[in-house]
Image: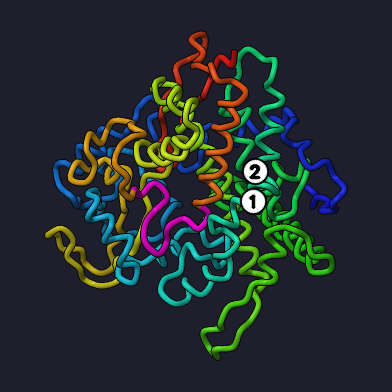
């Protein structure tokens, strides 16, 4: 059983980035992600999702069923009628009309329920109130002036400095996996080896719990709760320059009596756990996708090298072209009609925005990666009221990392001696590796 880590401030801030902890390989392999159980590891499902969209904007059945992939028995709760939205318009309706296509459906997921109360599974005014408590900590100016200077730039520099002098590297493990995990975990106040241990125990306590003996999952939950309680106690006594101190200072209007109040411990727990999952998982995979896109479209890498203002567009286009999480669930709570198709109340709906981002009704040459395409809103990090709260943090991590690579390794190219990187997975898609020649 793991013991609760020390949360003092004297540990080496970046020591975990330099370690060869075997848990990196265990946690950051797209093929071993718990959400990809049953998925064909030799197949890219993009063409199949696009074909379903071209056949009809809305289909009966879950995304997995329509693609012939075994269902995850523990993923979304009790049996329901299921439908999947594939067109841009259908997904836009599903995202925007959140009181009808409700995020509360997440509450049926055993894994999500173990995280506690979060904005992920709320709708309407409760969602807006709780989201507003942390909104200021994730806005673009705050990210550039605080997150970048406090964690992102230092982490990128440390990771890339250790590659200088090497001829080759797998950036999936050396950069993509380590950067977002270290950024968001350090942001809640953890340092050193606690960074990777927290992410490991959180996975075991939540979405990985179904594969563990109950006592092991319970031990991981106790570890996580003990760690967070220690951090909250420490930051209450001695406020730090971190996310937990920011959340401790945040106020919301209580929906019952209209009086301002501070966040509860459970609400702070939920924010921290959600930040680790979303920040440590999606950005890891999306950064690998973005780097691979530039390596396999060499002229865009060279364009970014000559004009750094294009890096932002390169990242944004990667979100449209190959988003890492191509589907989100919703629960339809009243009879509706979407794109001419009846959607009965009680239906579990899957918004397949991976296909929506390739909808030819919205995007020209949608299957092509093109950093010069006309700017249009994509759904790579969701859409509407539940658009990812940490999207600006994720963007800056990727932009700073790619700029760092351009600075140190301007002639970097894919390593022909390594297996060709492949885009794999379904719910959690990413690259099988990002093997490069640095010099």
Asked if residue 15 can be seen in this view, the reply is yes
Magenta range: 378-390
Q: Secondary structure at mark 1?
A: helix
Residue lying farthest to the right in this orientation: 10
Residue at image location 50% in from the left, 58% down from the top: 389
Which residue is under mark 2?
Answer: 152
Residue 208 vs 300, above or below: the answer is: below
Task: Evaluate if marks 1 and 2 touch, with contact meaning CB atoms under 8 Å apart.
Answer: yes
Lateral position of residue 386 relative to residue 149, left or right: left
Residue lying farthest to the bottom in this orientation: 257
Asked if residue 31 can be seen in this view, the reply is no
Which residue is under mark 1?
Answer: 147
Residue 245 vs 30, above or below: the answer is: below
Say few, some or many: other residues with alpha carbon within 10 Å of mark 2 (under 14 / 14 to 19 / 20 or more). many
CA gap, disc 1 to disc 2? 6 Å
Q: In the rendering, at what x and y percent does residue 85 appear? A: 25, 52
Q: In the rendering, at what x and y percent does residue 419 appear? A: 48, 15
The answer to whether residue 386 is magenta is yes
Residue at image location 40% in from the left, 26% down from the top: 300
Q: Residue 189 shows which numbered tag?
A: none
Lateral position of residue 290 relative to residue 55, left or right: right
């Amino acid at each position: 059983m793991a013991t609760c880590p020390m949360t003092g401030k004297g540990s080496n801030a970046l020591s975990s980035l330099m370690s060869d902890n075997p848990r990196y390989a265990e946690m950051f392999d797209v093929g071993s992600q718990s959400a990809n159980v049953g998925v064909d590891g030799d197949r890219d499902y993009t063409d199949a999702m696009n074909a379903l969209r071209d056949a009809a904007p809305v289909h009966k059945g879950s995304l997995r069923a329509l693609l012939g992939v075994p269902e995850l028995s523990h993923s979304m709760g009790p049996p329901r009628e299921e439908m999947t939205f594939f067109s841009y318009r259908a997904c836009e309706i599903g995202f925007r009309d959140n009181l009808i296509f409700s995020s509360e459906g997440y509450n049926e997921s055993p894994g999500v329920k173990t995280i506690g109360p979060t904005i992920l599974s709320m709708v309407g005014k409760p969602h807006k109130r709780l989201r507003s408590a942390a909104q200021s900590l994730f806005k673009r100016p705050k990210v550039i002036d605080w997150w970048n200077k406090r964690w992102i730039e230092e982490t990128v520099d440390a990771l890339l400095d250790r590659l200088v002098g090497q001829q080759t590297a797998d950036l999936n493990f050396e950069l993509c996996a380590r950067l977002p995990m270290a950024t968001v975990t350090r942001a809640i106040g953890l340092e050193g080896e606690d960074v990777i241990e927290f992410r490991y125990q959180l996975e075991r306590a939540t979405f990985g719990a179904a594969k563990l003996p109950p006592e092991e999952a319970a031990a991981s939950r106790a570890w996580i709760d003990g760690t967070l309680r220690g951090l909250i106690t420490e930051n209450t006594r001695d406020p730090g320059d971190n996310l937990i101190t920011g959340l401790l200072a945040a106020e919301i209007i209580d929906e019952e009596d209209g009086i301002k109040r501070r966040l509860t411990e459970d609400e702070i727990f939920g924010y921290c756990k959600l930040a680790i999952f979303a920040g440590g998982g999606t950005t890891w995979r999306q950064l690998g996708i973005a780097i691979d896109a530039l390596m396999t479209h060499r002229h865009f890498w060279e364009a970014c090298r000559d004009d750094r203002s294009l890096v932002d567009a390169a990242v944004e286009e990667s979100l449209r072209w190959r988003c890492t999480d191509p589907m989100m669930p919703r629960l339809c709570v009243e009879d509706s009609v979407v794109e001419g198709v009846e959607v009965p109340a009680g239906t579990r709906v899957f918004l397949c925005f991976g296909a929506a981002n390739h909808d030819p009704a919205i995007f020209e040459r949608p299957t092509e990666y093109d950093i010069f395409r006309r700017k249009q809103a994509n759904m790579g990090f969701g859409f509407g009221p539940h658009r990812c709260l940490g999207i600006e943090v994720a963007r800056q991590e990727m932009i700073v990392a790619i700029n760092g690579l351009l600075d140190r390794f301007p002639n970097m190219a894919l390593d022909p001696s390594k297996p060709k990187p492949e885009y794999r997975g379904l719910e959690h898609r990413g690259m099988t590796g990002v093997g490069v020649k640095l010099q």
